[in-house]
Structures are given as structure tokens and as C-alpha cells.
Image: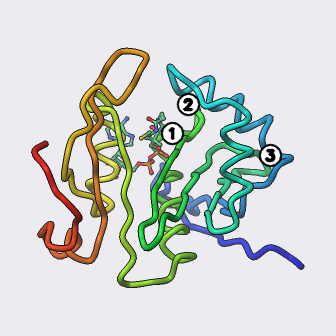
């Protein structure tokens, strides 16, 4: 079976130029060497190969690749726990950041989930202002803190949710919201 892919138009960097497009498709095992190389470049504590293999093996999860000009330059890992989608990992290679690729990966995730009642959650380092800004722009809202969540430096995680309520401006359907 041919895997469906989506072409997402991205913002053009120069006026008058045709907007480039990125292909978003399912991530698969042969992609993992490129994923690991990016993971090591962008995260202080990268996931191991075994962690990616485990996520890819989950039938209910959605793992996506962003391919630019034939090259894998970003990925997103999302697991489903009961009725909640947990965004476990999102990364874009350093030279390809700020071109809308993470936004395109998230847009494709929402399309594939295809449920207006879907609830998405994630943890992000408090110091990761770039990612927090991205998620807020995507309709995620901070709704709690996990103290000393990151073992490498003891940093807290901000827990963020994107739900029908957060998209409408409240935390009404977020389970157990806490102080942020
Ligand atoms: C966070 C990350 C995935 C964003 O990827 P990206 O493809 O650059 O993001 P996009 O181009 O889709 O940017 C979307 C929005 O994110 C925010 N953003 C992205 N890069 C930013 C930067 N350098 N400074 C401030 N905001 C930024 C902006 O709101 C941006 O929208 P705008 O360009 O219209 O202002 C990427 O920076 C990355 O891989 N970082 C390292 C890994 C990481 O921290 N992952 C998140 C873990 S929770």
C-alpha cells in the first residue's frame, strides 16, 4: 500500500518567490539513523535508538517525518494513551529551523487524528522558550508543572495541553490543571 503523504506550503523567505513545500509522511525504521543524528544535534539528552524503536512499534501512535528536498530534516513522535494524544518528541535539524517545519508536522498530526474532540498534551523544559512559543501559537496552554522532571539538570517541565477548551480560551476540559 502506498503511504499517503501531504504537501504543506511554507512561508516564502523572499517576496515573489514560490513558497517551498515540505513532504510530511510516516516515519519508518530505515529513517532512524537520520533521526538519531538530528536528535544528537538538537537535544542535550538525546533519546536512544531503543526509545525510537519502541515508539515506532506502537500501533496506535503517530510518528511523522518532515522531508525537505528528499532529505529527512525533522520528526514528530506522538503516542496515544486512552483518549489523550501525548506529543513525546518534536525536532527540526538546526539548519532547517524557523521555516515552519515543526508547524507543518503538528498540522499533519491534527489532520491524521481527525477528531475535533481530540486532546493533546506534552512536557517541555521551562527554559525552552522557542518550543513554548511554538506550542502556544498552536493553541497549547500551560496547565501544570512537573517538578525536576529532567534528570540531566533537575529542570522542571511545563505541562501543556491543546484541547477544544484551550482552543476556545479556557482549561475547562484539561484533567487536573495545576500551578504553572
Ligand atoms: C522547537 C522546534 C521544533 C521548532 O521547529 P521549527 O521548525 O523551527 O518551528 P517553526 O518554524 O514551525 O516555528 C513555528 C513557531 O515557533 C516559534 N519559533 C520557532 N523558532 C523560533 C525562534 N528561534 N525564536 C522564537 N520563536 C521561534 C515561533 O512562534 C514560530 O512562528 P513564527 O516563525 O511565525 O514566529 C525547533 O526549534 C527544534 O527542533 N528545537 C530543538 C528541539 C526542541 O527543543 N524540541 C521541542 C522539545 S519539547
- Answer with left or right where residue 142 lies relative to residue 124: left
Q: Which residue is mark 3?
A: 31
Alpha carbon distance from label 3 to label 1: 19 Å
Q: Residue at x 52, y 26 (%)?
A: 43
Q: Secondary structure at mark 1?
A: loop
Q: Among all residues in the image, which is located at the extreme right?
A: 1
Mark 1: is the Cβ under 8 angstroms from ligand 1?
yes
Mark 3: is the Cβ under 8 angstroms from ligand 1?
no
- Answer with left or right where residue 148 lies relative to residue 100: left
Residue 38 sits in which quadrant? Answer: top right
Q: Position of residue 112 (x, y in %)?
A: 57, 76
Q: Is residue 173 above or below residue 103?
A: below
- Answer with left or right where residue 14 lies relative to residue 1: left
Q: Which residue is mark 2?
A: 94
Q: Secondary structure at mark 2?
A: helix
Pick the quarter of the image with the C terminus.
top left
Q: Residue at x 57, y 52 (%)?
A: 76
Alpha carbon distance from label 1 to label 2: 6 Å
Is there CB contact under 8 Å for labels 1 and 2? yes
Q: Which residue is mark 1?
A: 97
Q: Position of residue 4 (x, y in %)?
A: 75, 76
Pick the quarter of the image with the N terminus.
bottom right
Mark 2: is the Cβ under 8 angstroms from ligand 1?
yes
Mark whose residue sits in front, 3 or 1: 3
Q: Residue at x 34, y 30 (%)?
A: 149
Amino acid at each position: 500500500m502506498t503511504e499517503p503523504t501531504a504537501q504543506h506550503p511554507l512561508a516564502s523567505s523572499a517576496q515573489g518567490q514560490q513558497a517551498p513545500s515540505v513532504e510530511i509522511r510516516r516515519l519508518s525504521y530505515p529513517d532512524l539513523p537520520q533521526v538519531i543524528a538530528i536528535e544528537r544535534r538538537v537535544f542535550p539528552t538525546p533519546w536512544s535508538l531503543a526509545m525510537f524503536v519502541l515508539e515506532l512499534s506502537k500501533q496506535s501512535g503517530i510518528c511523522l517525518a518532515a522531508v525537505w528536498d528528499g532529505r529527512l530534516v525533522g520528526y514528530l513522535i506522538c503516542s496515544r494513551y486512552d483518549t489523550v494524544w501525548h506529543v513525546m518528541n518534536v525536532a527540526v535539524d538546526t539548519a532547517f529551523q524557523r521555516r515552519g517545519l515543526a508547524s507543518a508536522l503538528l498540522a499533519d498530526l491534527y489532520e491524521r487524528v481527525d477528531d475535533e474532540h481530540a486532546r493533546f498534551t506534552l512536557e517541555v523544559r521551562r527554559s525552552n522558550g522557542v518550543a513554548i512559543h511554538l506550542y502556544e501559537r498552536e493553541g497549547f496552554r500551560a496547565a501544570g508543572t512537573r517538578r525536576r522532571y529532567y534528570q540531566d539538570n533537575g529542570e522542571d517541565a511545563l505541562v501543556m495541553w491543546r484541547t477544544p477548551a484551550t482552543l476556545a480560551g479556557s482549561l475547562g476540559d484539561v484533567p487536573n490543571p495545576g500551578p504553572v
